[in-house]
Image: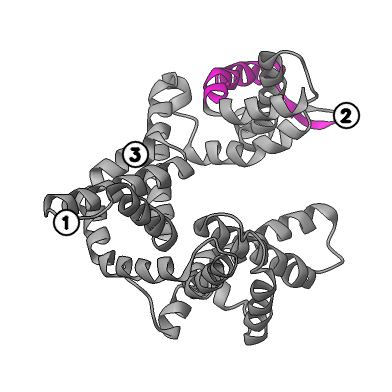
Amino acid sequence: MKIITTEEQFYNLIPPSVKRRMTNKDFEILDGIIDNNKRYFIVRSFGEYLDGNLRDSLNEFIREYKVEELDPNLDNDDWDNEEDIIYKIFWQLIPFLKKKYHDVLYDYYMGYHTQRGNINESSDNKKKHLYRRIGEIEDTLKEYEDLFIRTAKGLDKDGFIHATSMFIGDILAGRLEEKGTDFDYVTFRNQIKVFVQSHFYQELIDFYNKHKKQLTESQDERLFADLPPFLRRRVTMEDFKWMDGKLNEFIANTPAVSKFDNFCDYALGDLLHEFLVDRKDDEIDTDSDPDYGLIYNDESLKKISNMYWELKPFLKKRYKDRLYKAWERKK
């Protein structure tokens, strides 16, 4: 795991699409926001403090300075679309910010807790020996990579970070124990765990996201394998991505109902109707009408609609968690 140290290396973390939109003045403004917000999230673990501070600060910067650059004459739909694009572009700054501000915020975090007696000075000094174990921690991450991949696939993000850091703590403490060193196993193990969570937080998040993405892709492959052949030939991953992006819109418009199955039927029914009109209308035969021009052929419309309606059980399985959380909130 490479430790980035130079300004040029920091800057190279920024994607070109963001670099073109950031001026020196923008960076100065963002620096000021982060400095002003560093007092927030301070009572949490350092990993949560770092993540919360930078995400809130970046969100404030985008909202207050970049969204304001949009053309005020845009209609509501265009404005919403452009605003979404702005957020997606500038949210790519997160990896850069975590590398750039890690040490600054860590020093502030440790100073805050030391002053309040949460961390005493002698304890803080003793922890400096942990920096000498960075190489050993990196080697352990590589040595047990397959295990950590399986762990990432079975847990949520917080669970993965906790389990991985605890495992590394046990491995390093076990090695020290084998050497006959006189030390407190539990204390040392917990120090390693906290050190890994704070100093390897971004690496663990990147690792988790990478292998979760691979898992999602394999799940998509299984989803296609489960589809009937007539749908497998017609539905693409782009179709599923379209539905992924549209689902929240239809969830928001679905009223509260007492039964979860009914909620799913309403939301997915509306989603499939829009999907049919937006992406599959070219498969529906048309007739010429003297009053209305081209209209859908009723028989063809019914046939194509019934065919794509077969997607509903697969979509319910794909979106079960999102639908259930929304139903719980509304009921």
From the viewer's perspective, is 326 left or right of 154?
right
Label 3 belongs to which residue? 151
Q: Residue at x 61, y 31 (%)?
A: 322
Question: How far is disc 3 from disc 2 in space, using C-alphas?
Answer: 63 Å
Dot 2: element: loop
Nearest to viewer (mark 3 / mark 2): 3
Vertical arrangement, residue 284 with respect to residue 238, above or below: above
Question: How far is disc 1 from disc 3 in space, using C-alphas?
Answer: 30 Å
Pick whichever, 88 or 169, lies toward us.
169
From the viewer's perspective, is 309 left or right of 83?
left
Q: Residues within 10 Å of mark 3 (few under 14, many from 20)?
A: some
Magenta span of residues: 292-317
Label 1 belongs to which residue? 181
Residue type at mark 3 is Thr
Dot 1: element: loop
Q: Is residue 217 visible?
A: yes
Which numbered marker is on residue 117? none
Pick whichever, 65 or 155, lies toward us.
155
Q: Residues within 10 Å of mark 2 (few under 14, many from 20)?
A: few
From the viewer's perspective, is 286 left or right of 115?
right
Dot 3: element: helix
Residue type at mark 1 is Thr
- Residue 28 within the magenta-colored segment of the rendering: no
Residue 169 place in picture, x, y as percent? 30, 50
